[in-house]
Image: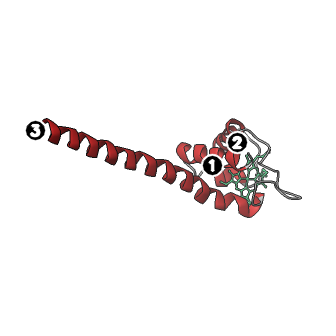
Amino acid sequence: MIKMMKELFTIVGFVALLFSSSATAQGIDRGALLATMCVTCHGPGGQGSKRIPSIDNHSDHELAEYMHGFKEGTERATIMDRHASSYSDEEINLLAKYFYEAKQ
Ligand code: HEC
């Protein structure tokens, strides 16, 4: 009986590990997926172009702050207010993390 319990705990632990690692991978993929929208204007690494500011020089905090500013209308924008308004707080965090890690 004790042996069976031990085996059961091992299986439960393994399944938990599987779920937690796939959740992390999913987080990274979602960030990259969301970022495909941004890179059409901001460039592949977020480096910007003549008329579009670069977003590869911000910390993850700053990028999230800008996005919230655009969303709430406190940051001046011609287009980003419309973009930012469609992202949830969680998605903004994923985007900020993605661009921050992309420049490392
Ligand atoms: C249609 C083109 C376009 C797309 C798509 C776009 N942006 Fe922008 N972004 C701009 C422009 C233009 C500005 C300058 C502010 C304005 O005029 O709205 C800007 C400004 C910014 C800024 C402020 C940079 C600074 O230093 O002033 C951040 C941060 C930013 N964008 C992040 C993003 C993220 C994250 C995405 C994807 C969710 C995104 N942008 C998608 C065009 C775009």
Indicate which disc residue 1 carries.
3
Where is residue 80? Give x, y as percent.
71, 52
Report if the CB atoms under discs 2 and 1 are less than 8 Å apart.
Answer: yes
For disc 1, the marked residue is 95
The mark that comes first in sequence, 2 or 3, is 3
Q: SS for tag 1?
A: helix
For disc 2, the marked residue is 63
Where is residue 94? Give x, y as percent.
58, 47
Q: For disc 2, does the CB lie below 8 Å from ligand 1?
A: yes
Where is residue 84? Give x, y as percent.
64, 50
The mark that comes first in sequence, 2 or 1, is 2
Q: What's the CA distance linking mark 1 and mark 3?
A: 49 Å
Q: Which of 42 and 5 is in front in this view?
A: 5
Q: In this view, does 14 lie to the left or right of 70?
A: left
Q: How crowded is mark 2: few (under 14 residues within 10 Å), some or many (20 or more)?
A: many
Q: Outermost residue, left direction?
A: 1
Q: SS for tag 2?
A: helix
- Location of the N terminus (image quadrant): top left
Q: Name the residue located 27 percent from the left edge and 46 percent from the top edge.
A: 11
Q: For disc 1, does the CB lie below 8 Å from ligand 1?
A: yes
Residue 82 picture quarter: bottom right
Residue type at mark 2: give it.
Answer: Leu
Residue type at mark 1: give it.
Answer: Leu
Q: What's the CA distance linking mark 2 and mark 3?
A: 55 Å
Which mark's residue is nearer the viewer, 2 or 3? 3
Q: What's the CA distance linking mark 2 and mark 1?
A: 8 Å
Which mark's residue is nearer the viewer, 1 or 3? 3
Q: In this view, does 15 lie to the left or right of 70?
A: left
Q: SS for tag 3?
A: loop
Residue type at mark 3: give it.
Answer: Met
